[in-house]
């Protein structure tokens, strides 16, 4: 029997982000998901090392890799539409849930439990915290995109940068590891290759 899960996941590279905005460089879902995975892993590591947490950073990376996988089926819903009002936001969450279920159906039964842990929250405090950090990583990735576009002279991303930056600053009190990442790593995203090396 043939299963389609990984073939579908591989199509993330065809889903472009920021569809309503003029981009100097297109960003696809595959690139974004990898960046979110790396940042989520870093946030959990910072939380463990500096703030006495015992979070599974590898799980955070996996959740980050698959966090937008439903968009293979739904497409990327632009943020202004997705969050226009609570009804649309809730309806879209339901659509994402159905899309995730459809993806999981494309796995053999013996593998589904391992992927359920990635796609479905388990209700534990650790899992809730990890998923909050994945959402923070998602916002940080968006902010990095905004910085990149603005540095390339594209003012189209100015408002998105302000909005995303404000949302990230709102996380500092409850998630100090986010502030640490911003303070120690974010500025270098605007540097040239020569400055980085």
Image (tube, rainbow, N blue to C red):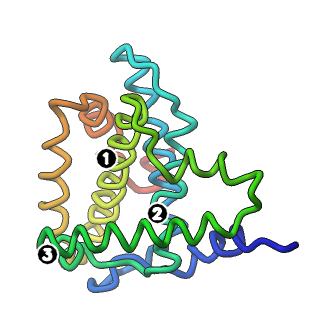
Label 2 Cα neighbours within 10 Å, binned few <14 / some 14-19 / many ≥20: many
Q: Which mark is residue 136?
A: 1
Which residue is pictured at 50% across the width and 46% down the height? Answer: 38
Residue designated by label 2: 32
Q: Upstream in the sequence, badge 3 or badge 1?
A: 3
SS state under label 3: loop
The correct choice, above or below, for 173 with respect to 97 in the image is above
Q: CA distance from mark 3 to mark 1?
A: 20 Å
Image quadrant in which the N terminus is located: bottom right
Of badges 3 and 1, nearer the viewer stands 3
Given residues 32 and 22, the one toward you in this image is 32
Of badges 3 and 2, nearer the viewer stands 3
Q: CA distance from mark 1 to mark 2?
A: 13 Å
Given residues 110 and 34, the one toward you in this image is 110
Farthest-out residue, front: 109
Of badges 1 and 2, nearer the viewer stands 1
SS state under label 2: helix
Q: Position of residue 188 (x, y in %)?
A: 35, 46
Q: Position of residue 125 (x, y in %)?
A: 36, 29
Q: Which mark is residue 84?
A: 3
């Amino acid at each position: 029997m043939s299963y389609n899960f990984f073939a579908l996941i591989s199509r993330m590279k065809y889903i472009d982000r920021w569809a309503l905005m003029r981009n100097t460089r297109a960003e696809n879902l595959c690139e974004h998901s990898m960046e979110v995975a790396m940042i989520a892993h870093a946030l959990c590591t910072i939380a463990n090392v500096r703030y006495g947490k015992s979070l599974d950073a590898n799980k955070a990376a996996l959740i980050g890799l698959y966090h937008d996988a439903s968009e293979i089926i739904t497409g990327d819903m632009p943020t202004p539409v997705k969050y226009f009002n609570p009804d649309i936001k809730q309806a879209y969450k339901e659509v994402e849930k159905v899309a995730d279920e459809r993806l999981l159906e494309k796995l053999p039964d013996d593998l589904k439990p391992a992927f359920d842990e990635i796609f479905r929250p388990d209700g534990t405090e650790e899992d809730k915290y990890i998923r909050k950090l994945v959402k923070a990583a998602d916002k940080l990735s968006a902010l990095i995109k905004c910085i990149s576009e603005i540095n390339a002279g594209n003012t189209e991303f100015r408002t998105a940068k302000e909005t995303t930056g404000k949302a990230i600053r709102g996380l500092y009190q409850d998630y100090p590891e986010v502030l640490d990442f911003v303070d120690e790593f974010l500025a270098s995203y605007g540097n040239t290759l020569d400055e980085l090396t």
